[in-house]
Image (tube, rainbow, N blue to C red):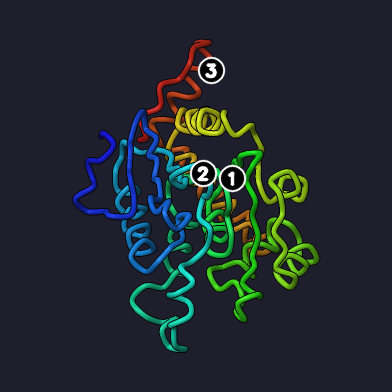
Amino acid sequence: MAKGEYQKDFTHLFIEIEQHIALITINRPEVRNAMNPESWAELGAAVKRLNQLPEVRVIMITGAGDEAFVAGADIAWIRDRKPLDIYGDVAVQDVLLDLYRSSKPVIAIVNGFALGGGCELMLACDLRIASDRAKMGQPEVNLGILPAGGGTQQLPKLVGLPKAKELILTGEIIHAQEAHRIGLVNHVVPHEELKERAYELARKIASKPPITIQMAKIALNESVTTDLPAGLALEKSLQAILFGTKDKQEGTRAFFEKRKPGFIGE
């Protein structure tokens, strides 16, 4: 599937699929890719659609241009929102929860500013690879609001409660190197190499058996919400599923035959 094939359906996104990897580019560079209701709705629809395509094994998300991943939510939208609007048709939490639960692993390619909702978008992804020029943070406190796209829940799980409190309560914006030091991003790479390195990571994951990746992601996500006995029971159940797959047979057969396995997702 070539870049632009979905453009009749999406105004604010570009989608490209190549070699089992889907790249979503948020395309609002004139506002540093700030997210409005329409772009959030499109992102949710795109993730759902890509999860339904068997040829897609990994999803990546980035922002158009060199300045921003997503610089936050559209401030005019925030200014005009009323209390019950948070429960309206476009619920950012729901979009990001669906992204977090995506059956396909999701990589954030953080090419610039990831602030507010942009940081929360990054947090909802499974892995984060950042440009050495990137900056990120949750500055919502400066607008008289809190991070309500999962920031208060996801950030502590990644960086620990004390550091999450510091970042959210001060609204501090940090550089990519500091984000890496505290565990907020997986990798920081030279800006010019960002996309290439992200594709290297995506190809490595895409080469693995898709059902195994899906089951492993379920187990990992639940590891931070459940106690050890329940987590181990889930792990055992997911392993039982994998024992019945063709890819398990192929993986073990390839090991004994000393060759590279060819996984088919069955």
Comes first in the chain, label 1 or label 3: 1
Is the C-beta separation of discs 1 and 2 under 8 Å? Answer: yes
Q: Is 52 rendered above or below residue 154?
A: above
Comes first in the chain, label 1 or label 2: 2
Label 3 residue SS? helix
| Distance from Cα at disc 2 to Cα at disc 3 | 28 Å
Comes first in the chain, label 2 or label 3: 2
> Residue lying furthest bottom in this view?
83
Q: Which residue does the numbered mark 2 point to in the structure image?
A: 107
Q: Tell me where residue 81 appears, x and y as whole percent.
A: 44, 83
User: Residue 39: which disc?
Assistant: none
Dividing the picture into quarters, in which one does residue 54 lie? top left
Is the C-beta separation of discs 1 and 3 under 8 Å? Answer: no
Q: Nearer the viewer, residue 147 or 238?
A: 147
Q: Tell me where residue 150 appears, x and y as whole percent.
A: 56, 68
Label 1 residue SS? strand
| Amino acid type indicated by mark 1 | Arg
| Amino acid type indicated by mark 2 | Ile
